[in-house]
Image: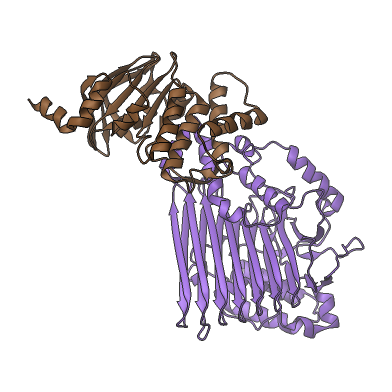
Amino acid sequence: MSAALRSFETQWRTRAPDALQPIRDAAMERFLKLGLPSLRDETWRYTDLRALGAQSYREAGCETPIAATPGAAASSAAASSAAAPSAATPSASLSLVSAGQHAATLTMINGCPVLDADLPDINGVEINSISELYKQDSARLRGFFEPASDADQRRWVLLNTALFIDGLYLKITQPVSTPIVIRHVSTGDGAQAAHPRVIIDASPGASATVIEHHLSEGDITPLNNSNTHIALGKGARLEHYRVFASGAGATHLDALDIDQAQDSLCRQFTIALGGGLVRSSLEARLRQPGASLESYSLLVGHQDRHVDCVNIVTHAAPNTQSRQTARAIAGDVSRVIFNSKVIVDAGANGADSKQSCRGLLLSPNAEIDTRPQLEIHADEVKCAHGATTGRLDPDMLFYMLSRGLDRETAQSLLVYAFLADVLTGMSVTSARAAIENALISQLPDSQTLRKFR
Amino acid sequence: MLKISDLTARVAGKEILTGVNLTVNAGEVHAIMGPNGSGKSTLAQVLAGREDYEVTRGSVTFEGQDLLAMRAEERARAGLFLGFQYPVEIPGVNNVYLLKAALNAKRKAAGEPEVDAYEFLALIRQKMKFMQMSESFLTRGVNEGFSGGEKKRNEVLQMLVLEPKLAILDETDSGLDIDALKVVSTGVNSLRDPARAVVLVTHYQRLLDYVIPDQVHVLSGGRIVKSGDKSLAQELERRGYDWVMEAQVA
């Protein structure tokens, strides 16, 4: 047994039992039996966790860091706009909603929700602690804790289920126009592990925008093993963002589960701008006819960052639709992986799926791996996929140089243009602007590039 | 202004230019004609600084400077402009932003302040009107979804905004209908100036009815085989390129 596994087991055994204990025990027993995923596991073949497994982890604490208070967040956002544009690493100061914008902000510190008197009051949104709600009404939440699975992409979710301290449960009951921001603040040291958990449960006909923003205080942070579960009722609509913007020493293992009922629409944006190791998975189940998923991934490899993104989309009902658009860029010695799989179940006729993945290599020492896959068990389906990876187009570059532009400016503009398909899909303009800003700061010649926006 | 001496160049290992000699003085318009594959576009691209075109011999000076020692962007800022035969589409990069960046790069190199946003918009609107281009060009990506004729107008628009000392226009007339040809010609003529020079690379004589050249050269087999005044273009139109080549052999 690895040091990591032993330390997780110790945490589990020493933790005081709670209402979720039978579920936690089942998950932990399965996790211990299966162990950490390795390069031999299908969805982990590009990400080596041996170094991570060799460490021991303590439970990350819930103490409030300074930046988690709303006042401090606002002032640090102001400071960031004045900061030198050459700052390469986005930090806790990246603010996804502008100061003037109406937004509701919730904070989780190392996975512990901050549920104090300042909790925003949003019409149509119920905010609860998962553990409190489970104590009161376990039936409401049981569906969000599925039976323990052996699938390798769910390995860390097992651990999350076993060890998460508490989590946020958001019930969206009607159309909500105010964007809801969940700031996942990570603080502490590398010998700690946190297991943030979020449930977003949208009633039939409800709609909302939820932005999950993962950020860190300082460069060295606890191991982050987060899980978000989205359930959309009939006709519900959700625009969901998960933005990884931690320091260069951060490790994120994030799993997103999406369950969609009839005629629901989920627009999902996965943005990897920070962190050292980011592994994000998305598993969507289009459970009833008319369910539709749009998944956008913007994966930025910078310095020695490793980004591994896995999407598994299951069309489980007729006339369901999925669109996946991934744009990966890799510079320096970074590595970016995008694996997507579309499964069409038997009987899901009329399923319509498209996967478009484009990679852009900015350095000879960077690497991009893309693998679109299809698994079709129905006859009448439309499934298209395309994956290309290349360098900047020399004709485009020469055209811009021949007009007198600096090489760096020309390159940055082309990179920026490459990502436009994802950026233009974002409907929260302040989030888009902040993401663009953070993105630009990781590109060469960021100062010039800012003038183009 | 431009002096090309015994220039040879290779593309993908193949010798395309085999010894070009050409002198263009300020105030002049030169036409370079020639059959397909004679090296016309290669010459234009080499002059603009395309890196994958390898110069193997010879020299080129531009206003007394060693042009071949300059990078493409330096050549542009020094006042050399290439109008592309096939302008590339760059989706996601705004047409006007590119032009503004180009103008500012040139001004910066000349030690001038950056252009004011308001002034720039006024300038570009005026030039667009002159080129009979619709306002939609302001918001579109560089050449994105433009027709062949729109792309060529856009090249001339860029030229008018950047006001180069030396404009090399590579088959800017090809693919244009007669109305577009007139607009493009008017644009080129508006740039004629004792301090500037224009090199028109063209396959056909018809552009030269509108932009009257001072000299006409025939490029064949990678070098200039015949030079003359505008009557040479008319003779080529009448007798075809074979006539020049046969004369060469004889």
Left or right of B178? Residue A195 is right
Query: At which x and y percent is residue B40?
Result: 28, 32
> Which quarter of the image is occupied by the C terminus of chain B?
top left
Q: Nearer the viewer, residue A279 or A235?
A: A235
Q: In the image, is residue B241 above or below residue A212?
A: above
Task: Tell me which corner region of the image, top left, top right, bottom left or bottom right, holds residue A277.
Answer: bottom right
Q: What colour scheme does the image use? A: by chain
- Who's brown, chain-wise? B
Considering every residue shown, the one lying at the far left of the view is: B250
Left or right of A128? Residue B18 is left
- Who's purple, chain-wise? A
Task: Tell me which corner region of the image, top left, top right, bottom left or bottom right, holds residue A136.
Answer: bottom right
In the image, what residue occupies the spot 50% across and 65% down?
Answer: A355
Q: In the image, is residue A48 above or below residue B210?
A: below
Query: At which x and y percent is residue A404?
Result: 49, 29
In the image, what residue occupies the spot 72% across and 60% down?
Answer: A211
In the image, what residue occupies the spot 65% across and 77% down?
Answer: A263
Left or right of A248? Residue A179 is right
Number of numbered discs? 0
